[in-house]
Amino acid sequence: MRTRRDEEAPVIDAVTSALAGCERVVLAVSGGLDSMVLLDAVSEAHPGPQSSVVVATFDHKTGPHALRAARLVARRSRQLGFDCVVGTASISATREHEWRYDRWRFLRSVADEFLAPVVTAHTLDDQIETVFMRILRDAGARGLAGLYAESEIVRPFLSLRRHDLEAYANVKKVAFVEDPTNASRAYLRNRVRHDLLPAITKLRPGFPASLLSVAKLAAAWREEMDETLSEIDVTIDHDGSIRVARRDLAGYDAESLRTLWPAIAAKAGVVMDRRGTHRVAEFTMKGHTGGSIQLSGGIEVRMFRDHLLVRKWDVGRVETLRAARLGSGIGHPETRVDLA
């Protein structure tokens, strides 16, 4: 039966446009509806040869459904002529952020080996949910950009709603595996998706659009901050530590520093929460050479004569300093240890 063009067009057009400049791609396919639609659409729309597409799927070891999903992805990829790489969880993760970290470490390793960007099936609904969740978590302006933030990840469906993909899957008879955890209210995203957003939207129909407006403003702000950083001497060491020239920060007030520091930290993949951002701004202005502060997430900021160093902190060292401080009753004037 011929596919109805009016239901196929938005998905196919989105993929064609997004992948137009990509010679090779790595498709992140979980086996769920959205990503299986991505796989099907790429098989029709990607202009390159089949060898230019690698499918990457990940078995989180969360139950029989995860294994079924991985097998479905591998089988369907073979049918379409695509190579498929299957990753397996090395740890028994139980939290959303643990699953995400494990999965993305695998996806990035495949992308690095294949020398191609990762392509995901995130939709506009995912963006709305992400921005709302970050508001609930008191994220700063950088976080509020959500999926609109500039990234090496390709997201063809970011302008499409989830129902667009559901319509495509229905017409094309796309096989997928429903993750049973998608209905569990134990996870914040599911509570947002099934309860909070529908309830608020019922009272305020324009609420999702307002969230997207905030995200677009935040994304534009991030770009401006990244341009400002070109005037600041920031060095990323081989171990992921960040060195920032003190002279380049000397002319900024507290408010400006609270704006700049999250952008600086993001260059090394470090996320600063609101409290940490305020503390680093204060430390930048009032700290002394040799001093240091510790932030949540195991981040240490140390002040040297000509630069500030942001790095993962040494727990043993901090405990030793704290013990010495408690034993003497006072701290060394040039060594400030704050535990978040």
Image: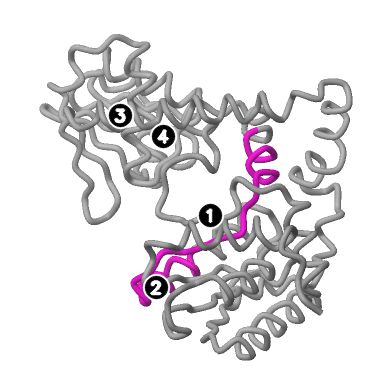
Residue for point 44% across, 70% down: 25
Lower sequence index among marks 2 and 4: 2
Task: Find the distance from the CA under tag 3 to the CA under tag 4.
Answer: 16 Å
Label of residue 292 in the image: 3
Q: Residue at x 82, y 21 (%)?
A: 204
Secondary structure of the residue carrying tag 3 is strand
What SS does tag 2 mark? loop
Q: Earlier in the sequence, mark 3 or mark 4?
A: 3
Which residue matches tag 4?
A: 323
**Residue that badge 1 annotates:** 155
Identified by mark 3, the residue type is Ser
Label 4: which secondary element = helix
Distance of label 2 from label 4 (alpha carbons): 55 Å
Residue 112 versus residue 234: which sits nearer the camera? 112
Q: Is residue 302 left or right of residue 168?
A: left
Q: Could you tell me if residue 326 is visible in this image?
A: no
Q: Amino acid at mark 2?
A: Arg
